[in-house]
Image (cartoon, rainbow, N blue to C red):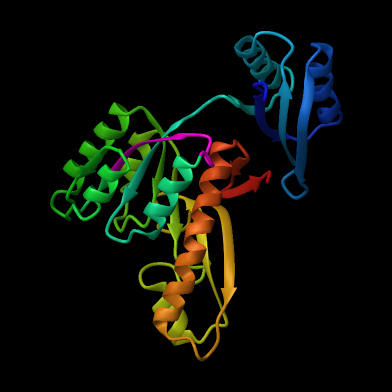
Amino acid sequence: MKAPTIIALLYGPDQPGLVSRVSSWIFLRGSNIHHADQHKDLEANIFFQRVEWAPSGQIEEEAAAFKKFANEELGMEVKVALSTDRPKVALFVSKTEHCFHDAILRFRAGEMAGELGCIISNHEILRGDTESYGLPYYCVPTSKETKAAAETEQLRIIREHGCELVVMARYMQVLSDDFLKEVACPVINIHHSFLPAFAGGKPYHQAHSRGVKLIGATAHYATADLDEGPIIHQDVTRINHRNAIQDLIRKGRDLEKTVFAHAIRLHLDNRILIYNNKTVVFD
């Protein structure tokens, strides 16, 4: 079994010697770096780094000591995680099931560094499938009149299961600004379009009417601005004039599954830094 490691994601104003100071701190403790990568935004003069290492001593103590070092001595924002962390995930779904099934099977196969805690839907349709997977299913019907109460119940369920990430597997409801503030954890959405093109509803119909030659899928963090959150991962596939709307939907669904899964994996592997509504992805 692979020995546990510490993973640190840090960013802040660039300054001379940052890479050396980080690696020296780890080396002088007798620890061993497994992987390190960095990036500098030349326009903003911001330094980003992801470093993973095997600690020489007690792992929690070393992780806490590095966080203090990065904050106080380097003046950097830092997130520190352990490779043994297995965050619980709440999966939101409506009626469309391809991303729902694909994500569950990937978690069951051990592809994700986390665990599904619960499934939340605004319909009963996928209850049987969810229960066949041995997962708890909560149906919280949502309408314009009941939205606030429904989101309060969703938040209760998320907290009850101790979830640290919400993923929207084609959940066809817009989460309110209040929900996104109260949930206090990241929310990942899969949008069936290569954003920022064709935002909103029925993007494949929009693409077909426009006669584009590429369609795509986008996984992004959800924010109060619909379909405008920081983009995590995107992919595209070619189409042509012979493809009907149903062909676009079929091809698009294949993209949606892989893009969604990859975004979840990147997040759970602690490979994403967010700044200025953009992401730095250490893949």
Compared to residue 83, the image places residue 150 above or below, namely below
Where is residue 33 shown, x and y percent of the image? 78, 25
User: What residue is rendered at 59% in x and 37% in y?
Assistant: 269
State left or right for residue 213 relative to residue 177: right
State left or right for residue 120 relative to residue 217: left
Depth check: give the residue in front, 75 or 103.
103
Depth check: give the residue in front, 169 or 11.
169
Q: Can residue 230 be seen in this view?
A: no
Where is residue 216 shown, x and y percent of the image? 53, 69
Q: Which residue lies furthest to the bottom in this view?
A: 242
Depth check: give the residue in front, 30 or 68.
30
Total numbered labels: 0
Q: Residue furthest left?
A: 145
The reply to whether the magenta stretch includes residue 236 is no
User: What residue is rendered at 30% in x and 42% in y?
Assistant: 119
State left or right for residue 135 relative to residue 223: left
Q: Is residue 176 visible?
A: yes
Where is residue 163 shown, x and y percent of the image? 38, 32
**Residue stretch rendered in magenta on the structure:** 110-119
Compared to residue 252, the image places residue 42 above or below, namely above
Quadrant position of the N terminus in the picture = top right
User: What residue is rendered at 54% in x and 37% in y?
Assistant: 268
Compared to residue 273, the image places residue 213 above or below, namely below
User: What residue is rendered at 77% in x and 29% in y?
Assistant: 34
| Quadrant housing residue 149 | top left
Where is residue 142 shown, x and y percent of the image? 18, 51
The reply to whether the magenta stretch includes residue 114 is yes
Compared to residue 152, the image places residue 43 above or below, namely below
